[in-house]
Every structure is written in C-alpha cells, then in structure tokens.
Image (cartoon, helix red, strand yellow):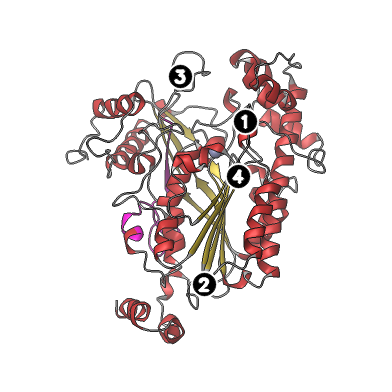
Amino acid sequence: MRRLHLATLCLLLLPLAACDDARDDAPATTGAGTLAGKPNLVLVTVDTLRADHLHCYGHWRETSPNVDALADEGVLFERAYSVMGTTLPSHLSILTGLYPHQHGYLANHGAMGGGFTSSAGRHTLAEALAAEGYTTAAFVSGPTVSKATGLDAGFQVFDEHHHPAPKTLEDTSRRSEDTTAAALAWLAQAPREPFFLWIHYWDPHEPNLPREPFASAFRTDERLEALIDERVIRPEVLAERFPPRELARLFAPELAPALDAGEDATLPPIDRDAVRRLLNLYDGDVLATDHAFGQVVAALKARGLYERTVVVFTADHGQALGQHDWLEHGRIQGEDVHVPLVMRFPAGVLDGPRRVLDVVSSVDLLPTLLARLPQLAVSDLRAQLSGEDALGPGDLRNSAFSQRSARDRDWEPGEDTDGPKFALTTRDWKYYFRPEGTDELYDLRVDPGELHDVADAHADVVEALRRRVLHVLDERRYTPEAGAEDTPEARAYREMLDKLGYTGGAERH
Ligand SMILES: [Zn+2]
C-alpha cells in the first residue's frame, strides 16, 4: 500500500521525472514496471476478424506478418472472446470496460434509443484520457462505428468516411489503405503528446473485395480443403438458408453493390468452389489489413514514437464463413466471438514477450491495459470496469461471457430466430443459455468446433455455468433514465430479462 500511495503522490504533486524511485519500487507481483511519463496509446480494432485467420493464432497462411511481429514483442492472448458478435456493442465494451447490458447497447441500431451518451459509470477510454491531458483522435472505416453511434465521445478528432451520395452499404465504408492514409497524415502533423489514437479497419467485413496484390495472395491448397471439411461447411445448406442478396455478399462479392442498389444479378453456383473462393478472399482482406497496420507501426517508428507508445491490436468479433451453417456474424459461436488480442508495451513494462492461455474477455482489455499504466489517474474509468487484469496476480476469472444482439435480423429464417441468447466460454467448455429452449454444452477439449452437444451428460456443469451467466447479467444492469428515448426492441429485451428474473440481483445466487 505504501508504494501505491507513493505512486499516487508522485502523480499528484511532482513532475513525472521525479517519480523514478517510486516506479522502481512498483509491486513485482504484476510482472510489470511502469513507464516514464504517460505513454501514447494506439488502439487498432479490426472489424470482423476471427483470430484463427491470423498466422500468429495458428493459421498456416502468412496472413499477418505485422501482427505477428507485434506479438513477438508483446503479449498475445490466445483465447480472447468478444462480448457480442455485433460491432457497436462490442466496441463500446472495449472502450468502456462494460458488458453490453451495462453500457446499454445491445444492437447496432439504437436498441436503447439514440447514440451512446456517457453518464456516471459509463465513461469511455477516450473521455478519460482526454481529461488526463491526452490528445485524442479516431480514424474509423465503417458505418456502425460512425459519429452517429456516439462512439466519438471524448475524441477531439473523429475522422470517418463521407460518401457524397451513398447508394449501397459499401459506399458507407472505406478501405484500410484510405483510413491509414488519414491517420498517417494526422501523425505527420506531430500531434501533441501523449496521444490516444484509435484506428478501426473494415476490410475483412463482407463483401470481401481485396485489391491486388491481396486479392490473389492465397490459392486453394490441400490445407484449405481440410479446413472446409473440419469446419463442416455445407454450401448446399447455406444456399437454401440465405436469400440471394446475402449469398451474393459472401460468395459473389463483386455482385453485392449491384444487388444492394436494387439491380438484378445472376448468382454463380453456391458450391464448394464458392466456399474456397470466399476463404481465399477473406484471407486476402486480412493480409491487406495487416499491411495497413504495418504502415502505422512503421510510421510510429520513423517518427521516433514507438518506444513510448502502447499498441493494442484486437477485433470486435469474428465471422462465420459458412461454419455452423451461417455466413456473417452476430451470433456467439466460437467463430463469431474468438478475437485476436495483442498488447505491446514499451520496454520495461512486461518481463518479456509471452502468450497467455487463459480465457479472457474484451471487457478485460481496459483493466489489463490500465493496470500496466499506474501513472494514469483515470479514477472514474478504473472504478467502472467490469473486467479483470488478465496479467495480474491471483486467479483469473478464466471465462468469457458473450451475448446475442437483442435485435432480430429480418433475413434470419425459421423459428428460433435469435439462436442462443447467452454463452460462456471457459477453459474446457462452451455453454449456451437458451432462455426459450434447451441449453447446450460443448467440450472444447475434444470438440473445439462445437459440433457435439453434451449437455445431457453433464447436467452439473450446465447448472454451474448457467448460474455464472445469470450472475454476470445481474451485475449493474443499465436502465435509461426516466424520460430517455426508449424503443420497442429495448423494451422487449428488458421484458424478456425480467421474465427470467434479472431485475434487481439481490435475490439471485
Ligand atoms: Zn463489426
């Protein structure tokens, strides 16, 4: 405690250079030292990037040389899971350290009404760092993180794509090369330090239309054939399940803009060859994103900033790519929520590069980051965090809660349109809580692809994991203030939770 007080006093009373002694005394239990002064922070979030398509996460293809290099210098979390397979809620969780039911955004389209506005207990990292004296700037690439969502809170510069007359969804997004160019132009102006720079990339999001040389970077080989078999991708089922427009977005991306604009187009056969092409193009977009990320790192190095900059690389969610008979994202199967998470700190903060095997959640990102940066006060932000320091001493929670977006997608067919509403990933299990159906359980030790439901054989595990899900949902649920705009989706969601008894939490055990 004495050391903590010393560090706090240094922050409050003394020039930072005078704090060296206190830093050297920092508790060793976290395996961390601290930095001289406040470091710059660069956060890169990639939309729709599943972890297992990066080389440093085991993909055989060289899709990610620059992320691999970052991981070689930092800490890579092998099993990081996003809270939702949906862009806005997931990003808000990354930036607030709160679960969706705590920050209040359960879907992309205003499930709780209007754009995000912060309030007590719901502040964003950008707001906290701006109050701490940081220069803050964001460069984003897609519509679901636009200014209209409120994600610009705390950013002095918020650079997004503007199309003069958007006709298709593609018109509302931009490529990583364009976002990077804007971010590098900002860096070239030598922004006042310390700065917080958030860059959001969109390339792996469907439709996958990488430019050369990325478009033809990957060709079908035996290992791709094995992957398609291993994931049990069934093009004939997908062709029946999804309407032409969705099929085009994945399997004939060059037709997607025309279909989005209401024009007619004839789809190619949705067969195994279409699946091969989808996977090759997706990997091309991953490589294009990695290339753009590499340019950012190179610019930081060229400007002499890298050694005093923390770099965090992650994704908001994954992408089904045909797995579990699904095409895009939004659900909470492993392929939807297993995301990359790599953190690289300036020298002296970590003992050395490492790979962490524990299960962590995207709500753990901020606690883990801020635990390495005790020179930042950000006390309101620290107080609100729901996650844990994934590199800290003691037992980690070692599980990750995810939940389905609360808004139905109108193209979802069939009964049970939402799929499982809640999931918990633990070291050994993947558990799905279906409030309106039968719970599911998968033994990840022998079934990492979640193909064989073993809930019947493990009723005790199901019960224990259900209690953990209910416990997460009981914590600090956000309710809009009286008079705030409400929506039918938000009301329906809360009624569903109320029916299940998530109202106060006091009686829940
Ligand atoms: Zn997204």
Tell me which label, 3 or 2, sits earlier in the chain. Answer: 2
The residues colored magenta run: 381-405
- Which residue corresponds to the image point at 47% horizontal and 75% vertical from the top-left? 34
> Which type of secondary structure does the marked residue at label 4 adopt?
helix
Q: Quadrant of residue 241?
A: top right
Nearest the viewer among 496 and 109 is 109
List the residue tagged with mark 3: 417
Q: Quadrant of residue 484?
A: top left
Residue type at the position of mark 3:
Thr
**In the drawing, does residue 143 fall left or right of residue 484?**
right
Crowd band around label 2 with a 10 angstrom C-alpha radius: few (<14), some (14–19), many (20+) = some
List the residue tagged with mark 1: 166
Whether 391 is among the magenta residues is yes
Residue type at the position of mark 2:
Val
Whether the residues at callouts 1 and 2 have beta carbons within 8 Å, the answer is no
Crowd band around label 1 with a 10 angstrom C-alpha radius: few (<14), some (14–19), many (20+) = few
